[in-house]
Image: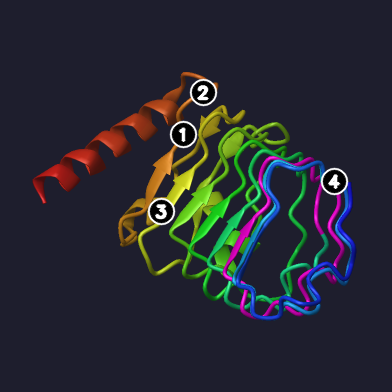
């Protein structure tokens, strides 16, 4: 259920730690203190419910963080504070219901997978603090449960790269596109997946379909 805090004391040069498919319920705060060269952590399919704020404090070379298929409810605000090189985070298939406001930027983040959680909104941090992001997967969450409407500001990402946003299979009922600036922007290949949402048939839905069809035809012709 738990790893000894000194289990990695003789493996300073290790770069990959994989303890997937076990029954771990807790990770000690100082577990990774002696493995400062680690680039990848994989603790997939365990029974973790909480992570200590200092768990990754010494892992400044960390690039990938795979903790999907656990039972995490949330995680500390400072968890990723020291990990400036993070390029891929997979926290899918957990029970995360909130994303803590992070005071730092994710300069290298390319892929963020939060599918199959319980998030109710798209955090502002995703728009402002992840300017290299290329894939954001928030499918199978609870987006729309508090406010069934998606408006242009919800999708106003500042990324300068191609960006794929997956919001499929949530609880979104309406997509309002009254702000033409959303469609006038050069989106550098921005794509949005809204499949499987319980859309209400109204003028906004019709407009969404027309916009999507128009952009798809333009893309094919160019």
Q: Which residue is mark 2?
A: 199
Residues tagged 1 and 2 counted as in contact (Cβ below 8 A): yes
In primary-sequence order, the first of circles 4 and 2 is: 4
Mark 3 burial class by Cα count in 10 Å: few <14, some 14-19, many 20+: some
Which mark, residue 210?
A: none
- Which element type, helix, strand or loop, lies under badge 2? loop
Q: Which residue is mark 3?
A: 182
Q: Disc 4 to disc 2, how far (Cα)?
A: 33 Å
In primary-sequence order, the first of circles 2 and 3 is: 3
Q: Residue at x 51, y 23 (%)?
A: 199
Check the image and report above or below for 205 versus 105.
Answer: above
Q: Residue at x 18, y 47 (%)?
A: 219
Mark nearest the camera among 4 and 1 is 4
In primary-sequence order, the first of circles 3 and 4 is: 4
Residues tagged 4 and 1 counted as in contact (Cβ below 8 A): no
Q: Which residue is mark 1?
A: 194
Q: Quadrant of residue 159?
A: bottom left
> Which span of residues is magenta-colored?
49-75
């Amino acid at each position: 259920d738990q790893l000894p805090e000194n289990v990695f004391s003789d493996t300073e040069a290790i770069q990959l730690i994989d303890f997937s498919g076990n029954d771990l319920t807790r990770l000690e705060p100082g577990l990774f203190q002696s493995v400062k060269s680690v680039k990848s952590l994989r603790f997939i399919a365990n029974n973790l419910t909480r992570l200590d704020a200092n768990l990754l404090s010494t892992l400044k070379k960390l690039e990938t963080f795979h903790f999907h298929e656990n039972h995490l409810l949330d995680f500390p605000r400072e968890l990723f504070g020291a990990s400036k090189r993070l390029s891929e985070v997979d926290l899918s298939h957990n029970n995360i219901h909130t994303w803590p406001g992070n005071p730092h930027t994710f300069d290298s983040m390319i892929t963020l997978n939060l599918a199959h959680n319980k998030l109710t909104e798209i955090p502002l941090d995703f728009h402002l603090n992840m300017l290299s992001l290329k894939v954001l997967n928030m499918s199978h969450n609870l987006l729309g449960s508090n406010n069934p409407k998606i408006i242009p500001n919800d999708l106003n990402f500042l990324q300068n790269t191609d960006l794929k946003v997956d919001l499929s299979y949530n609880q979104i009922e309406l997509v309002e596109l009254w702000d033409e600036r959303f469609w006038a922007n050069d989106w550098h290949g921005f794509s949005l997946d809204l499949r499987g949402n319980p859309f209400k048939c109204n003028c906004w839905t019709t407009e969404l379909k027309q916009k999507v069809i128009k952009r798809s035809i333009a893309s094919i012709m160019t």
